[in-house]
Amino acid sequence: MGVSAAVKPVSKWLLAGGAVLLAGFYLGCGTGPTERRKAVHKPSQPKSAISGLVIAQPRRTVTTTESRAPGLMDLSSPARRQEYYDALLDKDTVALWALWNQFLDQDDPNASMAWLLIGEALSLRLREQPDPDTLEAIAAALNAADASPALRQQLPLIVARAATPETLSLLIDKVINETDLEQRRLYQEAIETAANTQWGQRFHPELSPPLEAAWSEQWLQQDPEVLNTLALAIARIGAPDGVNLLLDTLASGGASIEEIEAARQPHVLAAVQALASVRNPDAAALLRQRMEHSQPENPVFLASGNALANIGGPAATQALLDWAQNATAETSDLARRWFSRLRDNRSIALAQARLANKQPFRSEQIRSILESSLDAVRNELRKQLP
Amino acid sequence: MSTIFSLFSIALLLTATSANAVAPLPESNSGNRCQASYNPINQVVTLPCFRSLSRANQTSYSRVEMKLDPPAPPFRLHTLSNNTTTTPDPADRECIARYDEASGKLVMPCLRIRGDKSNSNFYIGLRQLPDNAVGFFRFLVTEIKPAPAPTRHQQARVLLLLHGMSSDEHTWNDYVRLETAFDSCATIALGVVTGRASLPRAQPPAIGCFRLRFGAYDGFSGRTGLEHIRAHGPRSGDFSTFNTLGKEVGDAIQAIKRLYQTTYGPLDLKIALVAHSRGGLAARAFLQDANASEKSGIVALLTTGTPHRGSPLGRIYRYLQDNCLDSSGFRKDDRFFGIATTACDNDWQVVDFLRARKNCIADTFKQFIDFFTSSGDPEKLDVRRPTIDDLSDYSEPIQRLLDERNSLPTDIEYAALRYTGIELGRLDKEYRIFDLAGRDYCDQVSRRAQNYLLYPTYSNQGENLGDGIVPFGSQALPAGNVTEYARGELGAKLHIEEPKPLTGQQAHISYMLEHLLKWGFRQR
C-alpha cells in the first residue's frame, strides 16, 4: 500500500466524520470521538450528501473526559442489540466504517458492544456494497504504525467475513507483505475464515481467482506459511479452476509419491495438504476426470480420490463408486480408506443401491470392502441407540 | 353418536399394582357433578370424578398408560398422585399426557376433535384395566369449544449448533452441507441473528437451523492467557468462562425465539442444541444455570466429543504456567542459536507449532503417504488461551459443572456421541504431541510435560483412547438425575481433524436426533 493510496481515503473520512456523527445520533450515540480520533475524523464543512446520508455538523462539542457514548441505547439485552444491529444495516459502508472507528478502543462495555455490532454490520455491508475507497481506508488503517491491538485483531476478521474478491485481495496483499509474524497470523486466519464463509448457503468460486493469482506468484517464494494459507483457501473454496491449479502443482512435483517425498518442495507439499480440504461438490467432476486420466500410484490420482471421499454427498460418492466398480484388487487399501469416510445419508443410500445392483464389480475384494464399510456405518448407527 | 363415541373414546389403562382409579359408574355419572369436559384450546380434559389413589401414600410413584381408541399413539402418565411429572413416551414424545389430581385436569396434547363439533355432546370412555376388573366408564363431554385454527400455534423446530474452542460457526459447514433438511443456517453472534435474516413467510421451515459463533464476551472478560495474550473482541469464546459461554447460548435462544415470533406470531417452538466439544459444556452451563431464562422450548441436547469430565490435554496450560514462564510472565527461552536446550524450549516449540501448523515433513514414507489420505488440513490451536485451562480434567470450572449436574432440567432429552480408538494426543492423522511408541515427526512435548499431562490417570493406553483430545470416558454426560439417551461406542474419529469428523458426521447426528426427537430429517 503506497502512501498516496493510504492518504486518499483519509480525505473521504474527513467528510465521513460528519456523516458518522449524524449516524451516531440516529443510533443514540451522538457524541464525538476521542482526541486521537478527532484528529483523524475531524469534520470538514459538509455541504452535500454521501451515499444518502446528509452530512451534518456535530450538534455540540464534547470533551474527552465526557463519556463518549452517553446517548447510546442500552445494549445489554439481545433484543436491543438486534434492534441496533438491524438499524445499522440501513447504513452505508462509509458511515459504518466511520462509526466503527468512532467506537474503537472505548472502555465503556456498552460502547464496546456497539463497536462489535458495527463490525458485524460492516462485514455485511462491505459485501453488499463494495466500496474501493473504504477498502483502501481499511488497508491504510491496518498499515498505520499506531494502530491499536483491537484494530489489528478484529479488523482482518471483519474484512474476511465480507468474503468478496475485493476484500480477499486486500487480505492476500497483507499476508504477503506483512513482516510482523503475529500480525501475519491474523491475516492468515482471516483468509481462512473468508474461504470458509459460505454466505447464501453456497461455496463462492468467485473468491478463487485472486488466490490463484497469488499462488502463481508466490509459489516460487517458498514461504511455507503463506503457501499453506493460499493453498488451503483455494481448496476450501473448491472452485474447479483452483482445484485444478493445485493438482497441476502436485503433478509438477513428480509422478510418484517417492519423487515428491525426495524433492519436498514447499509449494507441492502445501498443495498436497490443501487438497484434502476440498469440499465443494462442484469440483467432483474435475476430480473424477483427473482420476480417470491417472494411474493409481500417481499422486494426482491419490489426491483426487481422497478429495472425493472427503467431499461426500451424491456427486463425489457416485464418482468413487464408479471407480470402485472397475478397480482392481491392488487398490483395495485406497478403497478401504475412502469408503470408511461414508458419513451422509445420501452417500450411504447410493452405496447400498450400488451393491444391490446386479452389475458385477471387477474385483470381488473391492466389492467386499464396500460392503464391510457400509456394515461399519450401519453398526455405528445402531451403536448410537440404547 | 356411537361413531363419535368410538372416535373419542379413550382407554385408560392403570397398572393395577401401583394405582387405583375411583370413578363413578356409568349410570351415576350423567349428572352435572361428574360430567367431564374437553377444552380443545388448551387440550385439557377435566374429569371431576376421576381419582387416582396410591396404595402406599400420596407421593408414591404410580404409572398410568392411556391410549386412544381407535388406534393412536399411546399416552403415558406417571406420578399421578401429587404432581404432574411425565415420562417420555418412546412412541411419540409430544403426546405425553399429564394429569393434575388437584384440579382433576388431564392434558392430552394429541387428542384432536375433528371438524366443527361445537355445541355437540361427546362421550369419552375410560377403561380401567384389567378390563374386566373394574368396569367401563363413560363420561359425557359437553360444551366443546371450536378448535383453534391449526396455524395459530403451529409448531416450529430449530437446531442450534454450538462450536468448540478455537473454532467458529464454520465448524458446521460440512454437516450443514450434507444435511438436506435445512434450507439455510444463519449465524448468531453477539446475541443477534446476523445477515439479512430470512425465514419463509408462509410457514416455518420443517427444521430451522442456526449456528452460534461464540466470543461475544471475550473482550469483556478481562481474562488473559499465557504470555499475557488477551482478546480485544470475539476470539471463539476462548477467553470466556463456561458461564459466559452459557449466557451466549441463552442470548442465541432469545434471538431465535424473537425472530420466529416476529415472523410467525405465537407458535410452539422447539429447539434442539447440538454441540461439539466445548460447545456441550456451554450448553450445560446454560441449562444448569438456575437463573437462566429462555429454557422453555429446549427439547434436547446432543453433544459430540464433549469433554464432560475435561481432558488431560488441558493440563498443558497449567504446566506451562507453572514451569515455563519467567517472573514477568513471558516464556523462558534458553535456546542456543535457535536449538532447544531445555524441556520448556521443546514445549514452547510445540505451542508454536500448534498455532501455525506449518508443514512438518514426515520422516517416513508411511507417514508421508498420510498426507495423501488425510481428511483435511489440521486446525490451528492456541493452547495459551485460558479456555484450555478451563477444559483440563483438573479444572475447577469442570468440577463445578459436574457438581451441579443435577440442575440439568429433566424434561429435556440428552444424548452424547462418543468416539474411541484414537490415542490421547493424536491431534490429527499425521501428528501427535506425545513421544509414544513408534517414530515421531514434527515437535513433541518434553518428557516432563508428557508426565504432567498423562500421569497417573492416563498412563495406560486403555484409559487414554478416545478421539485424540477427549478420552472416551469423558465424552459421556455425567450421571445425575438425567440420563443420556444413548452411550454408544463409535469408531475412530479424530476430534479436530477436518472434515470435522465429529461435526460433519451427518448420518450420526441426524440419526440420533431422529430417534431422540422423532424429527423427520429424512422426509425431504
Image: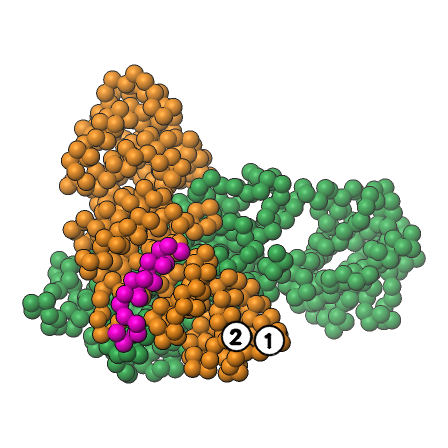
Chain colours: A orange, B green
What element does badge 1 sit on? loop
- Residue B2 falls in image quadrant: bottom right
Q: Is residue A173 left or right of residue B96?
A: left
Q: A249 and B264: which one is in front?
A: A249
The quadrant in which the C terminus of chain B is found is bottom right
Q: Which residue is mark 1?
A: A359
* Amino acid type shown at disc 1: Gln
x, y percent for residue B46: 77, 51
Q: Which residue is mark 2?
A: A325
x, y percent for residue B472: 42, 74
How far apart in space, not on screen, are marks 2 and 1 (Cα)?
A: 9 Å
Q: Is residue B330 left or right of residue B261?
A: left
In the image, residue A257 sits, relative to residue B106, either above or below, namely below
Sequence-wise, the earlier of marks 2 and 1 is 2
Query: Going by the picture, which residue comes out furthest to the left?
Result: B337
The answer for which chain carries disc 1 is A
Q: A37 and B491: which one is in front?
A: B491
The stretch of residues the image draws in magenta is A240-259
* Amino acid type shown at disc 2: Gln
- Asked if labels 1 and 2 touch by Cβ distance under 8 angstroms, the answer is yes
